[in-house]
Image: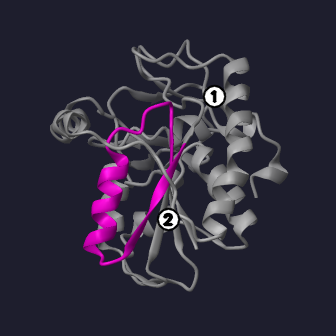
Amino acid sequence: MVLYFSATGNTAFIAKQIAKRIGDETLNLLPRIQRQDFSEIRSEKPFVICAPVHVCEMPRFLAKYLKEVTLSGNRKVYFIFTSGGYTGISASLAKGIVRKKRMIYMGRSEFRMPRNYPVSRLYPMLPDEEVKARLLKAAHKIPKTAAKIRNGKRLGGRPVTLLEKLITLPFNPLWEKYMQPTQPFYTTDRCIGCGKCARLCPLNKITMEDGRPRWEGSCAHCMACLGNCPFDAIEYRGRSEKQSKYRIDKYVKKKYLI
């Protein structure tokens, strides 16, 4: 079974394309994460877990969920990571989660995908040409990755260094605590109060009040709300207004996304 969490479509695209090629089903973990449903997920085929990378590791809420959910049946677990170019210590954390579950870690594959984070001052959104080039390169990589999984072979990947662990392990929690506030999120007059942003928030940090979304506390900055707004009505004050908003269905035909 192919399990995935995806905010703006990159990871869902890879997950569904791999599932199609290995003849397996997919399971979107978003509803389970929102409900904190840790009930058993059973698969007779190896598990393939597809995850984005946030600040050098998989989203912390996703890692927490994977630690607690019960996976049964086949003991082999593959990981697929999507990122803007650097997966950090994601592989090391994934291996640790799998081993604690007494399962078999079968390696990971990394896909360099378009950026979806228009609230960063450090990494501007990519021009259309680069977005299309990255998606095309990822599409070419999918069949080879799927073939290895289908044939029961291990996936490779670069080793995670001790220096990366020493830098990232304390860095990510601090970034999450201080650099991901929700106060700057706001809606423009294009907002019609459809509530899609609230339905997509993995941490349930968005509520609808008087027909408008309201963000509370800190969040994962996954960009599901901002990227998927059907009217591009969500902004992040002082950062996103002049940046393009990304979601994969602007570039990939629907037939490849289902």
Q: Quadrant of residue 95?
A: bottom left
Image x and y of residue 219, in percent? 33, 43
Image x and y of residue 212, in percent? 50, 40
On screen, residue 47 above or below 124: below
Q: Left or right of 177: which side holds 227?
A: right
From the image, tell me which residue sits under label 1.
190
Choose the circle earlier in sequence order: 2 or 1: 2
Nearer-the-camera pick, 209 or 165: 165
Q: Are marks 2 and 1 in contact (CB under 8 Å)?
A: no
Query: Residue 243 lies in magenta, yes or no?
Result: no
Q: Left or right of 158: which side holds 189?
A: right
On screen, residue 45 above or below 218: below
Q: Left or right of 93: which side holds 7?
A: right
Q: Quadrant of residue 105?
A: bottom left
Question: Please, what is the three-letter code of the amino acid marked with disc 2?
Answer: Leu
Quadrant containing the N terminus is bottom right
Image x and y of residue 52, in percent? 48, 46
Question: Please, what is the three-letter code of the amino acid marked with disc 1?
Answer: Arg
Identify the mark at residue 29; answer none if there is no mark.
2
On screen, residue 100 above or below 39: above
Q: Quadrant of residue 216?
A: top left
Crowd band around label 1 with a 10 angstrom C-alpha radius: few (<14), some (14–19), many (20+): few
Nearer-the-camera pick, 164 or 19: 164
Q: At 20% from the left edge and 31% from the top edge, which residue is drawn? A: 178
Q: At 69% from the left edge and 50% from the top edge, which residue is drawn? A: 142
Magenta span covers which residues?
81-110
As helix, strand or loop, the secondary structure at mark 1 comes to loop
Query: Residue 96 lies in magenta, yes or no?
Result: yes
